[in-house]
Amino acid sequence: MAIATTDAVAAPFTYTNARFGTVCTFPDEIFTDRLPEPENGDGQQWLSADGASLICSGIFNIDDDTPKGFIAAEKSSEGPSYKITYSRTGKDWAVLSGLKDGTIFYERRLFGMDGVIRSVWINYPPALKSKYDPLVGVIADSLRGP
């Protein structure tokens, strides 16, 4: 799978989280700065030189959350620094996009039959919308579990 960028075709990097089996693929020549994994081993975060970030992680679904319940809860927590502009759900997934703290965000969550919610979160400055908008859907669609 090649991820097209505005300048060239990027070679993908696939990350697999050992704790939850969360998998996502993204261009590692854009997200170059891998931050230390948290002690609980729930995922990983990468930063780009231009101010974007990507998180691929998992959590136990201890509240038996559903895609529709997740979207409803997020919409109820909107405020001056958090605005959802797009949301969609399926049987076992949810997608949100909008603005948070002055940046554009895109989040996809998969609600696994194994009691784990796997997610990918990407955020970037609005000035870089034309660079990242073509990437977020491809990266989000790569999210999967075992």
Image (cartoon, rainbow, N blue to C red):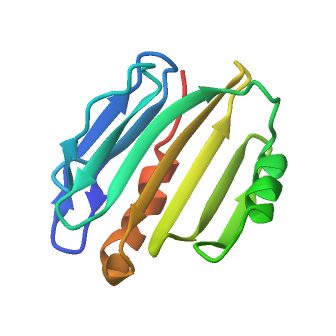
Residue 60 appears left or right of 124: right
Q: Is residue 58 above or below residue 114?
A: below
Quadrant for residue 60, please give it: top right
Residue 107 appears left or right of 9: right
Which is more toward the observer, 18 or 6?
18
> x, y (%) of residue 126?
39, 80
Quadrant for residue 96, please give it: bottom right
Q: Is residue 72 above or below residue 35?
A: below
Quadrant for residue 80, please give it: bottom right
Across the whole image, how many numbered discs are drawn on residues?
Answer: 0
For the point 47% across and 25% down, the residue is 42
Which is more toward the observer, 95 or 9?
95
> x, y (%) of residue 66?
81, 40
> x, y (%) of residue 47?
26, 52
Q: Quadrant of the C terminus?
A: top right
For the point 49% across and 21% down, the residue is 21
For the point 37% across and 63% down, the residue is 135
For the point 52% across and 61% down, the residue is 106
> x, y (%) of residue 27?
25, 51
